[in-house]
Image (spheres, rainbow, N blue to C red):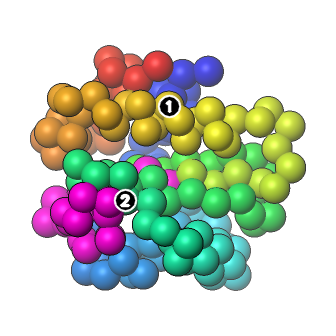
Amino acid sequence: MRLRELFTADVVKLDLESESKDDLLKELVSVLDLDEKSEAILFKTLKRRENLGSTGIGKGIAIPHCRSLVVNRLRLAYGRKPGGVDFKAIDGDPVRNFFLIVAPPLEVSNQYLPVLGKIAQFAKDEAVPGALLELESPEDFLALLDEKAS
């Protein structure tokens, strides 16, 4: 399965407003359009994961991810914060691009880790960080995935 097949325009937010790591995680979770209780549980789970070590992989990109019972299938979202947020990334730079991955604990399709790997591979492409900052619409994001992601 290609990454492009896992994203839709409604889970792409190019103008994240949050100024802190916690608020940004909450805002990113809200893109999934879950109920309030599920959003709170998911935020706590993601925060626990971040406390183990930042998911900021460098080059302005972070891949917050976790498994949670609040979803019944693999869910992804993409958010961009042009000004960046201190996310304690591995290179120390602010993070501008966020790929959220959430999967149920027992996932029949077993896509969680392969998708995490595909996003990391996509992010390693030299042209991708700059291209992400130039996106003007969710459709541009989907087209970039078509072009650059496997």
- Residue 83 horizontal side relative to residue 66, left or right: left
Magenta range is 82-100
In terms of image quadrants, where is residue 40?
bottom right
Q: Note whether 36 is above or below 87 in the view shown.
A: below
At horizontal 69% and vertical 35% (from top left) the residue drawn is: 111
**Real-space CA distance between mark 2 and mark 1, rounded to the nearest whole angstrom:** 15 Å
Location of residue 141 in the rendering, given as x and y in whole percent from the top left corner: 31, 36
Instruction: Decide if residue 72 is in sight here.
Output: yes
What residue sits right under mark 2 in the picture? 56
Callout 1: few (<14), some (14-19), or many (20+) C-alpha neighbours within 10 Å?
some
Q: Name the amino acid type tagged 2.
A: Gly
Position of 27 relative to 141 (above/below):
below
Q: Residues within 10 Å of mark 2 (few under 14, many from 20)?
A: many
Residue 97 in view (yes/no): no
As drawn, the label of residue 49 is none
> Is there CB contact under 8 Å for labels 2 and 1?
no
Residue that appears at 42% across and 81% down: 22
**Residue 129: where, in percent of width, then height?**
21, 41
Number of numbered discs visible in the structure rendering: 2
Tell me the residue that label 1 is attached to.
118
The amino acid on which the numbered mark 1 sits, given as a three-letter code, is Lys
Q: Report the residue at 23% width, 48% height from top.
A: 59
Side of 104 where 58 appears, left or right: left
Circle 1 sits in a helix, a strand or a loop, which is it? helix
Residue 121 falls in image quadrant: top left
Task: Mark 2 or mark 1: name the one nearer the start of the chain.
Answer: 2
